[in-house]
Image (tube, rainbow, N blue to C red):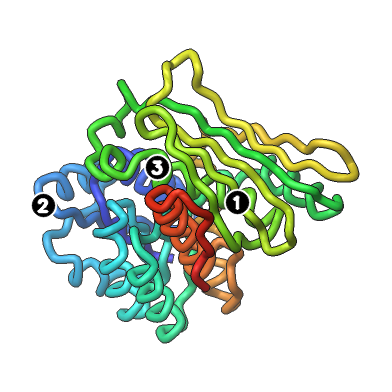
Amino acid sequence: MRFGVLGTGTWAKDVHASALAAHPSAELVGVWGRNVAKAKAVGAEFDVPGFADVGELLDLVDAVAIALPPHVQAPLAERAAAAGKHLLLEKPIAFDVAAADRVLATVRNAGVASVVFFTFRFQAATSTWLAQSARTQLAGGAGSWLSSLAGTPFAASPWRQERGALWDIGPHALSVLVPALGPVVSVQAGAGLRDTVHLVLTHESGVASTVTLSHTVAPMSEGIEFFVHGDAGRLVLLPDTGSPVEAFGTAVDELTAAALTGGVHPCDVAFGRDVVAVLATAVRALDSGCRERVAG
């Protein structure tokens, strides 16, 4: 499958382009970016051209891998899908449900395959954890991701600074808790120090889970843990954040398989849309101080 990368930032270069360039059955054809000079520079690192015209790149590929801010990604994903290109998107797929709905509608109308790169979902440990969870009568769960963006390549990311941990790492929490516990139907939320947020999620099954997210804790407080609990005890997932390139390679394989078979991937844009709906509901709950129901 021939891929174009849309984006020139650290994640686009070090994960998307690197994984595609090394992939045994995918071909990296070119890079497009809002800054043409950066697109050409990133492309040169992988011996492919950098494009000033996204349409020109779309004409040469079967699929696009997009690593851009969500509000930039969504309209480009629509354009690529309408042109018949398969989509490998970043999370969240958009900042509002209306934009996510437009991407979903375009994908369905075009009949293209889609995968959203929720990193943990493309790791063997997560698959094992979800399989164990499916064999357990679950009573609830919890997740905590405490981090510091200071000193990382993402510290200067405008959208992460503006939207905080809820929109950046909240999708990762939902990507593991939702398949384990079921769709979220309502959200309660409370704000903590700086961008820290605490969520209580009520799932369709009637069980609840709690999530704490932050990008602004002290470095010594950093850590990630998810667990579900039930009749078989507590099942703990300690996600791997050190191998995104390998996980992205798996995502490429699974997008390719979905494109060839016409299958629906569990992390497709429909799931990505539902994640956006939960995050938007959490924002409303923070503003209102009340439990808010998730829009269907």
Q: Dot 1, crowdedness within 10 Å: few (<14), some or many (≥20)?
A: many
Which mark is in front, 1 or 2? 1
Q: In this view, does 13 lie to the left or right of 1?
A: left
Q: Give the Cα separation between the discs numbered 3 and 2.
A: 20 Å
Q: Mark 3 points at which residue?
A: 15
In the rendered image of this protein, does residue 225 appear above or below residue 77? Answer: above
Q: Give the residue displayed 55% in from the left and 58% down from the top.
A: 253
- Name the secondary structure under disc 3: helix
Q: In this view, does 58 lie to the left or right of 285?
A: left
Q: Name the residue under label 1.
A: 201
Q: Give the residue displayed 12% in from the left and 60% down from the top.
A: 52
**Residues tagged 1 and 2 counted as in contact (Cβ below 8 A):** no
Say whether disc 3 or disc 2 marks the residue closer to the N-terminus.
3
Which quadrant of the structure image shows residue 216?
top left
Q: Which amino acid does label 2 sit on?
A: Val
- Name the secondary structure under disc 2: helix
Q: Give the Cα separation between the discs numbered 1 and 3.
A: 31 Å
- Image position, residue 262 (x, y; %): 57, 79
Q: In terms of depth relative to the viewer, which is nearer, 25 or 293?
A: 293
Q: What residue type is labelled 1?
A: Leu
In the rendered image of this protein, does residue 1 appear above or below residue 200? Answer: below
- Name the secondary structure under disc 1: strand
- Image position, residue 221 (x, y; %): 50, 18
**Residues tagged 3 and 2 counted as in contact (Cβ below 8 A):** no
Q: Is residue 57 left or right of residue 102?
A: left
Q: Name the residue under label 2.
A: 36
